[in-house]
Amino acid sequence: MSNSSSTTQFLLLAFADTQELQLLHFWLFLGIYLAGLLGNGLIITTITCDRHLHTPMYFFLLNLSVFDLGSFSTIVPKSMANSLSNTRTISYTGCASQLFLFLFFIAAEYSLLTIMSYDRYVAICKPLHYGTLLGRRACVHMAAAAWGAAFLTALLHTANTFSLPLCQGNAVDQFFCEIPQILKLSCSHSYIREVGLLGVSAFVAFGCFVFIVVSYVQIFRAVLRIPSEQGRHKAFSTCLPHLAVVSLFVSNGIFAYLKPPSISSPSLDLVVSVLYSVVPPALNPLIYSLRNQQLKDAVWKLISGCVSEAINYLSCSA
């Protein structure tokens, strides 16, 4: 029997038993990770450098890309390193840090998605008041609220989870540290506190979801009243990427944590955990770029400028 004071490391779930499959997992995750780094990095750089994109919508999109980068940078590199070195270990401090950072970025992202639905609601339903309701100061305050609420949520959950005595071994049935798997290792009834805290967080998350749904009901009603087809198309183009990201985020999370036990299996749980923790941060830049011509033009302008400067530098060097 062991407790939390004697636990110095945890064993994460391996993706495969053979070295060949572990290397395959490494290269697959490396490709996804580099794609996510490139996509989110381009969005952050483009919005920062292009003054035409210094609007509330793109300010929130920049923050979303930062959260995406943070969330999968917290778990993917460690998983790749374990596969490459054929190990499963993560230190006690590393596990606590990973849990805190992942919770922080996920909570911040969900809060920001809720704020972005309000941004779209004001832009379409109350366009004359957009500059007043979503001025520079209001946007900064809302983004700061998302960062602050996420930090407090992650701190409370991490401190509560890792204050529990652990006596069920140190094998975490997941490829990264998350609360349900740590709770399974506890032998104390104190875990009920964390379950209660999770219930409160779930209630707040459900409230945010209801707010997003109500906002989009009002948005669609307003869009359908627009007389011109071009106007309706433009309005939908600004809303559909956000709606797609929200749907991907919420559906994967719900299926991961609320799926029936009858269909649960280790392999399915592993695939689902990858789908909700690794894939969305890599896909979100693509989703936002597909139907946003202004963002695509800005990204292309940035890439073309960098290529031109590189060619000029090589020509001068020659």
Image (cartoon, rainbow, N blue to C red):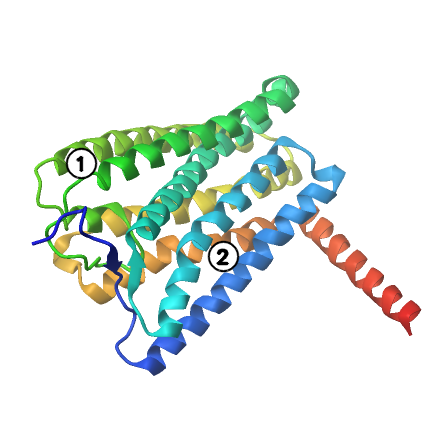
Q: Where is mark 1, residue-wise?
A: 195
**Where in the figure is residue 221, as x and y percent of width and height?**
48, 29
Q: Quadrant of the C terminus?
A: bottom right
**Where in the figure is residue 135, as x and y percent of width and height?**
63, 21
Q: Secondary structure at mark 1?
A: helix
Amino acid type of the residue that numbered disc 1 sits on in the rendered structure = Val
Amino acid type of the residue that numbered disc 2 sits on in the rendered structure = Ala
Using the rendered view, name the quadrant where residue 84 is placed.
Answer: bottom left
- Nearer the observer: mark 1 or 2; the answer is 1
Residue under the point 75% across and 53% down: 302
The numbered disc on residue 282 is: 2
Q: Quadrant of the N terminus?
A: bottom left
1 and 2 marks in contact (CB < 8 Å): no
**Where in the figure is residue 167, as x and y percent of width and height?**
10, 50
Q: Is residue 15 left or right of residue 75?
A: left
Q: Front-most of 85 and 202?
A: 85
**Where in the figure is residue 134, as x and y percent of width and height?**
60, 23
Using the rendered view, name the quadrant where residue 228 is placed.
Answer: top right
Residue under the point 14% across and 38% down: 191
